[in-house]
């Protein structure tokens, strides 16, 4: 399914951000989506040349598939990164939307559409991780053992709520500063104002509890995201 492929195509990338805490607005076709700044995150400042360069790199990476609506990074990490005390950013957030859905609204009730997306994503994940353990923690360990360097691996659906479907990916990365790290990402899919929106939370994989911690944080971010757009919290019908 094209939608599932779009989910898997989104890449992992490190970027800079600044300290403003105001909410963002994302325009998708005729709809305007309010994007609250996630807790302990600061938004990308496109007036900074380095930030703009990285923003453009993300945009180029997503070209033809998704469009970046907003980007954030951990404020403390950002401060150290800008001061030269930190070579990389490990914790960051991206909000995206598929280009294919900008011109027209998704037909149907948002909760029903989200449920269908989750079923499709779950089925796609089962194909990709066929033969792996059903337990998510065991699945991660199995993926880690077999994952090649810089290979993005899909971990499947990790949670489902009426207005959001959560899935996860993992990647062993060789960084540009000569170090290695394992990047974990939990992302949600929601329908807001008739538009599909992806909310990504990136972090490091440190131990067996990393996914649980990142998922709980992502759920809080998404709850705030949905609350900021209450008129479309699963009640749309076309």
Image (cartoon, helix red, strand yellow):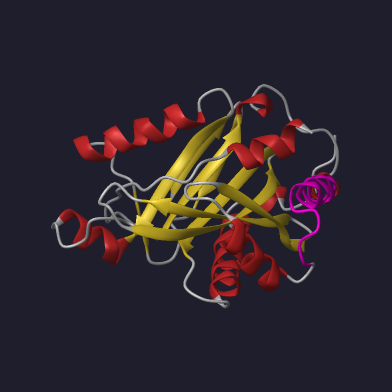
Q: Position of residue 88 (x, y in %)?
A: 28, 55
24 over 49 or under it: above or below:
below
Return the residue nearer the eye: 213 or 67. 213
Residue 180 seen in render = yes
Residue name at image x 18 percent, y 54 percent? 82
Residue 48 seen in render = no
Residue extent of the magenta highlight: 116-133
| Quarter of the rendering containing residue 212 | bottom right
Q: Position of residue 236 (x, y in %)?
A: 80, 43
Q: Position of residue 90 (x, y in %)?
A: 37, 59
Magenta part, dominant SS: helix
Q: Is residue 90 left or right of residue 226?
A: left
Residue name at image x 43 percent, y 52 percent? 173
Return the residue nearer the eye: 183 or 72. 183
Q: Is residue 233 left or right of residue 16?
A: right
179 over 116 or under it: above or below:
below
Residue name at image x 38 percent, y 51 percent? 174
Q: Is residue 156 left or right of residue 33?
A: right
Say whether residue 35 is magenta. Answer: no
| Quarter of the rendering containing residue 193 | top right
166 over 176 or under it: above or below:
below
| Quarter of the rendering containing residue 70 | top left
| Quadrant where the image shows the C terminus | top right
Instruction: Give the farthest residue toward the left.
Output: 83
| Quadrant where the image shows the N terminus | top right
Return the residue nearer the eye: 120 or 74. 120
Q: Position of residue 130 (x, y in %)?
A: 80, 53
């Amino acid at each position: 399914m094209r939608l599932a492929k779009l989910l898997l195509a989104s890449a992992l990338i490190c970027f800079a951000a600044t300290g403003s805490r105001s909410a963002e607005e994302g325009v998708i076709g005729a709809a305007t989506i309010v994007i609250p700044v996630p807790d302990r995150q600061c938004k990308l400042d496109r007036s900074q040349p380095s930030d703009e360069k990285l923003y453009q790199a993300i945009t180029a990476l997503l070209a033809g598939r998704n469009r970046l609506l907003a980007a954030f990074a951990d404020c403390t990490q950002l401060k150290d990164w800008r001061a030269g005390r930190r070579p990389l950013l490990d914790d960051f957030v991206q909000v995206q939307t598929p280009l294919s859905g900008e011109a027209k609204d998704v037909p149907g009730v948002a909760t029903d559409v989200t449920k269908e997306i989750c079923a499709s994503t779950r089925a796609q994940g089962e194909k990709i991780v066929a033969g792996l353990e059903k337990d998510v923690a065991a699945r991660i360990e199995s993926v880690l053992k077999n994952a090649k360097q810089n290979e993005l691996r899909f971990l499947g659906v990790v949670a489902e709520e009426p207005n959001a479907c959560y899935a996860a990916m993992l990647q062993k990365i060789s960084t540009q500063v000569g170090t290695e790290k394992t990047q974990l990402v939990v992302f949600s899919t929601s329908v807001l104002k008739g538009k599909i929106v992806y909310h990504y939370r990136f972090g490091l994989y440190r131990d067996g509890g990393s996914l649980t911690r990142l998922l709980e944080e992502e759920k809080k971010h998404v709850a705030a995201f949905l609350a900021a757009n209450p008129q479309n919290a699963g009640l749309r019908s076309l």
